[in-house]
Image (cartoon, rainbow, N blue to C red):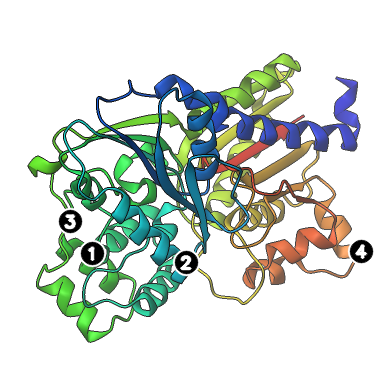
């Protein structure tokens, strides 16, 4: 394919794969098929996450009866709605706006009857946006613990286990507040293996983990807790809703979009362009830089043994990696992955890659991700930029901005985790 000799075409192709993956998880496309039948009583809509406002908008466009409710989303992620109130709050560290929004959501589901329906719209980011600390825990406590978790390198399931046990609404507690109304949760997954309990820390699904589990995680990562919070966990005073609880027996949860669906859409687009596509996993975890080094070995193996008739090909993957923050740079897990991958490939010819967060925000930057090519290290050296120094300082955004290789989409209003594509041409 002569296009593969054109760096501009290759970059555009890979960025288009990323955008295709994002589009596959658009709530307007995937939500309508999962709407329940209207109830005898009233319909209340609640929700939290980076996609919750657009989910609410899609629901309104396809719902024939009256409804009302409140959803909370990240600052800059609101969209116009007619009947459902959209409140913006802080992510990834919760704030007062999130606290007030969550309390409004709790008010919405008070005094419901068995004839009423609660539709809960949940997507990634909901763990920070849906915030109401358990009694004895302040918002400042939650903020400090959340920041420590984000820097610890703990995987998302462990972080969310802790979050659930410090909350009045997570770990099935929100569903319990809706009882005896019917609860139908529509979920967009941003977590490995699409575990419902880990999407926004599972506000409407029961939780088999315990306060003791949460305390073990805190101790494993050396996170400091105020004495009052430590004692609440130690004595099990903030326990979550368990699977046997009658208040959640009839709660339903439906997955409407997930990482594999997005990867499959990208794979189909690649194949339509005559490029073979292999999805190597939709739930890859671990340190971003370590995964990059492992991926580099895989790429070298494929490139050295690939049958000429099978070239070119693109390796697609998703999941949620972690970064143990040691520097003070402007980083995100996707640019960390790409920078480590470029270093490991060391200018290997014919290899191009993109990585980005499908919500449009890698880390806390308004940058979705970035792109690397065989000349990434050469171009950085001409600018007297040492990639290893940038990696050690967790400063991937600064590195790729200098090379004009960032991917900026703005808020995508969905979230199906990270997207990675490595082209072997």
- Determine the CA span between mark 3 and mark 1: 11 Å
Asked if 77 appears above or below 282 in the picture, the reply is below
Taking the spot 61% from the left edge, 44% from the top edge, the residue there is 79
Q: Earlier in the sequence, mark 3 or mark 1?
A: 1
- Determine the CA span between mark 2 and mark 3: 24 Å
Image marks 2 and 3: residues in contact by CB distance under 8 Å: no
- Is residue 283 toward the left or the right of residue 253 in the image? right
- Please give the label number shown on residue 214: 1
Specify whether residue 279 is in view: no
What secondary structure is found at the residue carrying circle 2? helix
Image marks 4 and 3: residues in contact by CB distance under 8 Å: no
- State which quarter of the image contains the C terminus: top right
- Determine the CA span between mark 1 and mark 4: 48 Å
Residue 66: which quarter of the image?
A: top left
Q: Earlier in the sequence, mark 1 or mark 2?
A: 2
- For mark 2, what is the residue? 97
- Mark 1 surroundings within 10 Å by alpha-carbon count, few (fewer than 14), some (14 through 19), many (20 or more): many
Q: Nearer the viewer, residue 175 or 14?
A: 175
Q: Earlier in the sequence, mark 4 or mark 3?
A: 3
What secondary structure is found at the residue carrying circle 3? loop
Give coordinates of residue 270: x percent, y percent.
69, 22
Q: Nearer the viewer, mark 1 or mark 4?
A: 1
Give coordinates of residue 27: x percent, y percent.
53, 32
Taking the spot 62% from the left edge, 58% from the top edge, the residue there is 336
């Amino acid at each position: 394919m002569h296009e593969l000799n054109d760096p501009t075409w290759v970059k555009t192709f890979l960025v288009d794969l990323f955008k295709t993956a994002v589009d596959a998880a658009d709530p307007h496309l995937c939500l309508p098929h999962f709407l329940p039948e209207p109830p005898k009583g009233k319909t209340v809509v609640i929700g939290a996450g980076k996609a919750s406002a657009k989910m609410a908008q899609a629901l309104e466009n396809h719902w024939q009866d009256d409804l009302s409710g409140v959803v909370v989303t990240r600052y800059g992620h609101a969209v116009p709605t007619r009947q459902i109130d959209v409140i913006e709050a802080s992510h990834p560290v919760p704030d007062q706006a999130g606290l007030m929004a969550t309390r409004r959501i709790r008010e919405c589901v008070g005094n419901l009857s068995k004839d009423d329906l609660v539709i809960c719209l949940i997507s990634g980011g909901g763990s920070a946006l849906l915030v109401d600390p358990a009694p004895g825990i302040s918002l400042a406590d939650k903020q400090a613990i959340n920041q420590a978790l984000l820097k610890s390198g703990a995987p998302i399931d462990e972080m969310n286990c802790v979050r659930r046990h410090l909350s009045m609404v997570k770990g099935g507690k929100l569903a319990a507040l809706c009882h005896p109304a019917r609860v139908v949760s529509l979920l967009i997954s941003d977590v490995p293996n699409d575990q419902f309990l880990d999407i926004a820390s599972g506000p409407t699904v029961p939780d088999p983990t315990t306060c003791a589990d949460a305390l073990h995680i805190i101790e494993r990562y050396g996170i400091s807790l105020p004495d009052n919070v430590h004692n609440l966990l130690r004595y099990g005073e903030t326990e979550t809703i368990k699977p046997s609880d009658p208040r959640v027996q009839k709660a339903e949860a439906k997955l409407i979009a997930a990482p594999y669906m997005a990867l499959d859409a990208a794979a189909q687009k690649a194949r339509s362009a005559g490029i073979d596509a292999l999805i190597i996993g939709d739930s890859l975890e671990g340190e971003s830089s370590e995964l990059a080094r492992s991926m580099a070995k895989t790429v070298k193996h494929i490139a050295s043994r690939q049958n000429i008739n099978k070239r070119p090909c693109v390796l697609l993957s998703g999941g949620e990696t972690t970064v143990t923050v040691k520097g003070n740079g402007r980083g995100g897990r996707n640019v960390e992955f790409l920078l480590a991958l470029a270093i490991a490939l060391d200018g290997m010819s014919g290899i191009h890659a993109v990585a980005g967060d499908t919500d449009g925000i890698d880390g806390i930057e308004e940058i979705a991700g970035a792109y690397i090519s065989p000349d990434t290290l050469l171009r950085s050296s001409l600018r007297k930029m040492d990639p290893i120094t940038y990696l050690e300082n967790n400063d991937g955004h600064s590195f790729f901005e200098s090379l004009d290789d960032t991917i900026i989409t703005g808020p995508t209003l969905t979230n199906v985790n990270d997207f990675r594509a490595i082209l072997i041409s």
